[in-house]
Amino acid sequence: MTGMVYLVGSGPGDPELLTVKARRLIDEADVVLHDKLPGPEILASIPEAKREDVGKRAGGEWTPQEYTNHRLVELAEDGKTVVRLKGGDPFVFGRGGEEAEHLAANDVPFEYVPGVTSAVAGPGVAGVPVTHRDHTSSVTFVTGHEDPTKEESAVDWHALAEGGGTLVVLMGVGKLPAYTGELLEAGMDPATPVALVERATWPGQRVATGTLGDAVEVRDREGVEPPAITVIGDVAATRGRVAAFLRNGPGGQEESE
Ligand code: SAH
C-alpha cells in the first residue's frame, strides 16, 4: 500500500510556532526529510533515527531537488508516512510546489500543511508589520537570490521600486548590493528604511537597521548572514517606535543591540 507524504511548514524556527498539526505529524512520521531551515531547536526535537537531511551536503553542495523528489516517492511507495519538513511555509520559496507536482505525477497522495512564513514573521519579530494603514497597503515577497543583472531575470526591481509597497526579500543577503542598487537606480529614495532580520525566532536572532542607501554597509558591519530577511519600506521605521517595548528577542528577552 502506498504511504503518505505531508508537505509541512515548520514556521520560522521557534518550536512553539510549529502548528499543533505539524508537531503531531512529525511525531507520527516514519521519516522526516528536512534541511537546516527549520532551525536548531526544532531539528533537535526530532529523533535522529527518523531524520534525513536533504539540505546542504558536507561539501557545501545542495542535495539536488531531483534526489529529494525521488526519495519522497520511493519512501511513499514503500508504504511509509513521510513528513517533508520545510522552514516557514512549504509553498513560499520552498520548492513545495515542485514536490507536490512530482508526487501527483507519481500517484502519491499528499497533504499540504501550512506554516508561519518567515516572510511575515521575520519582519514581525523585529517590530515591523508588513502592512500598516498609515504606510503601505501592499507587500511583495521576492527572492533576492537571482542575479538582477542577468538578462532573463524574473524579478523586475524597477517595477517593484515604482510600486511603492513593502518589499520583503528572502534569500537576499549575498545579492543585497545588486538589488538595492537596482532599486536606487530606479529612483527609490535612499532614505527608505530597511531592516535585516537574521535567524528570526532562533536562539541567535539579530536585527540590524539602516536605509536603502546604507544597507550594504550595515550588512557588512554587523556581519549579517543567512538565513535573513530584508524588509524595505516605510514600515521598517515602525521598529524604532516600538522596540523599547518589544519582547521578541532571542528567548523572548528584550533585544540587546
Ligand atoms: N519557505 C520559507 C522560505 C524558504 S527560502 C518560508 O516560508 O519562510 C529561504 C529564505 O527564507 C532564507 O534565505 C531567508 O531569507 C528566509 N528565512 C527562513 N527562515 C528564516 C528565519 N528564521 N529568519 C530569517 N530568515 C529566514
Image: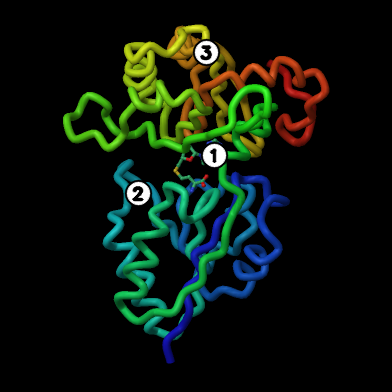
- Label 3 sits on a secondary structure element that is loop
| 74 or 121, nearer to the observer | 121
How many numbered callouts? Answer: 3
Where, by quadrant of the figure, is residue 161 drawn?
top left
The residue pinned by badge 3 equals 192
* Residue 4: x %, y % from top left: 48, 79
Residue 132 image position (x, y, % from top left): 66, 29
Residue drawn at 60 percent across, 67 percent down:
26
Point 48% across, 23% down: residue? 164
Residue holding disc 2: 57
The residue under label 1 is 119
Quadrant in the picture for the C terminus: top right
Indicate the position of residue 44 as horizontal and vertical percent values: 61, 53
Does the Cβ of the disc 2 residue fall within 8 Å of ligand 1?
Answer: no
User: Which residue appears at 51% of the width and 71% of the height?
Assistant: 111
Q: Earlier in the sequence, mark 3 or mark 2?
A: 2
Say which quarter of the image contains residue 209. Answer: top right
In contact (CB < 8 Å): disc 3 and disc 2:
no
Q: Earlier in the sequence, mark 3 or mark 1?
A: 1
